Amino acid sequence: MREGIPGTPTQGEWLCKVLSSGSRVGVDPMLISFDQWQSLSSQLENCGNSLVPVAQNLIDLLWEERPSLPANAVFPLPVSFAGQTWQEKVIEVRKEMIKKQASVLVLTALDEIAWLLNLRGSDIEYSPVFFAYCVLTLDNLYLFVDEEKLIAETLKHLHLDASPTHEYSGPFIEQRPYKLILDFLKGSVSQQQGKIWISNQSSYSLDSLIPHSKRITDPNPVLIKKTIKNSVEIECIRQAHLKDAVALCEFFAWLEEEIAKSEITELSAAAKLEEFRKTQKEYIGQSFTTISASGPNAAVIHYTPTEKTNRRLTPNEIYLCDTGTQYRDGTTNVTRTVHLGTPSDFEKECYTRVVKGHINLASAIFPNLTKGQMLDSFARKPLWDVGLDYRHGTGHGVGMFLNVHEGPVGISLKYRSDDPGLQSGMILSNEPGFYEDRQFGIRIESLVLVTKADTKYNFGNKDYLKFETITLVPLQTKLLDPSLLTEEEIEWLDSYHQTCREVVGKALKEQGRT
């Protein structure tokens, strides 16, 4: 069974089926979000059962020699990358708190804390975040992070090396141990007269401390502001994508040259790609494990090559490469699909229809605050026209040297109640695909920047938006069936490839890589 697939029961449905009435289901309240708790509790109550918190995690009692939490250093992100000081961000967030009559804002999402304070870490593989909690009041800011993680540069950045008599007059931060968040909230809730802003995605242990009458659960201002990149962040992200394009163009050129000469596998191809990337400035690491997939493995949407599944790349099948990088000046995610020999007519038709959908979405013009759900069908229509489809969303938000999957924005058939709507400055992926089980898979993914569109009219004075494709990696024209393309689609492809040639070609020459 796989959750979310039609016919698969929810956790609550399955538990109701296998448990007798009157059963009690125990859950560690630190490991389940408040909204998950509410949903599961409601389902269990409907069948005569109950959900109860278990303060002592039973696995912890059995797990001997359990590794301790990472003690990796937390480091500052310079304003030259962030575009704003953390002090400026705190002032803006407090203004939003006042509008909501909130006296406290509790942040538990690691990327929100990292963004607000212009800090990064390495506690989670592929995501430059660190374990912490943050509580912001109208007068104070409390950062719950273990002290040994804060290097001298970070202490200076946060002015934790200053005192109230120091010449620094901005907002002060109080550092407290990571594990003290529960005790702090218990005391803070009883003392606060105003509302407390906390996400329903926070753990049940934290969220349940706050009375319903005091709780604000609307998307918090950090969540929204983080998704809207400022001009400095946008310029940095462009540079990160240019560096990534250089590495990917080198990689695919190498692949075309070597495929007939050497034995190249999914794993060795992924390793070679990373070799090219590591030569680029500000390289930190991957933003997720590269999906290096050939032939039937490419039909597995979230495939990860292992020593057991590793296949050799051959000239007679499709190769799909979905990959991403963390540079200090931006996060990338790109997918390109190529055929290393002669594709079949069906492969060409499927690829062409995926490209058509990609162009449809990339060319869309839509009103400000349009929900991503309303745009998803733009990418699917060329496939739907002939009875084809794909089983994943079309786009996800992407952070600025943060999570490669950044909510709450996205482009999908699924409805999200917390989707704020698309706004200028947001960055998302555009990634339609098609997967023929046990044969091949196709996906084309580029990142797009939401920008203002210059329209002839402006109905409702709401402003209209469009996408700018910021990924600059050419598509393989050999896999295209030109007879299926309109003149407008051919013009789009020609223009895109001309931009790739000019911009990436210049960078290749400047780096001495041609």
Image (cartoon, rainbow, N blue to C red):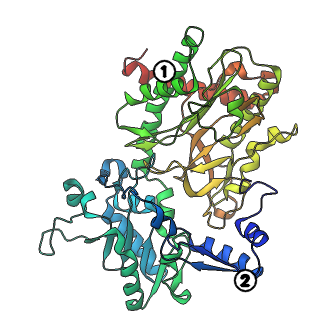
Q: Depth check: 146 or 53 in front? A: 53
264 to the left or right of 130: right
Q: Residue at x 39, y 48 (%)?
A: 232
Res 250 label: 1
Residue extending farthest to the top is 261
Which residue carries the number 2 mark? 22
Res 51 label: none
Q: Depth check: 211 or 267 in front? A: 267
91 to the left or right of 340: left
User: Identity of the amino acid at label 1?
Assistant: Glu
Q: Residue at x 52, y 28 (%)?
A: 270
Q: Please give the count of numbered marks on the rendered protein.
A: 2
Residue 11 percent coordinates (x, y): 70, 66
Q: Quadrant of residue 345?
A: top right
Lower sequence index among marks 1 and 2: 2
203 to 380, vertically: above or below: below
Residue 200 percent coordinates (x, y): 56, 73
Q: Residue at x 68, y 31 (%)?
A: 297
Can residue 179 be seen in this snapshot? yes
- 1 vs 2, front mark: 2
117 to the left or right of 503: left
Circle 1: element type: helix
Residue extending farthest to the right is 386
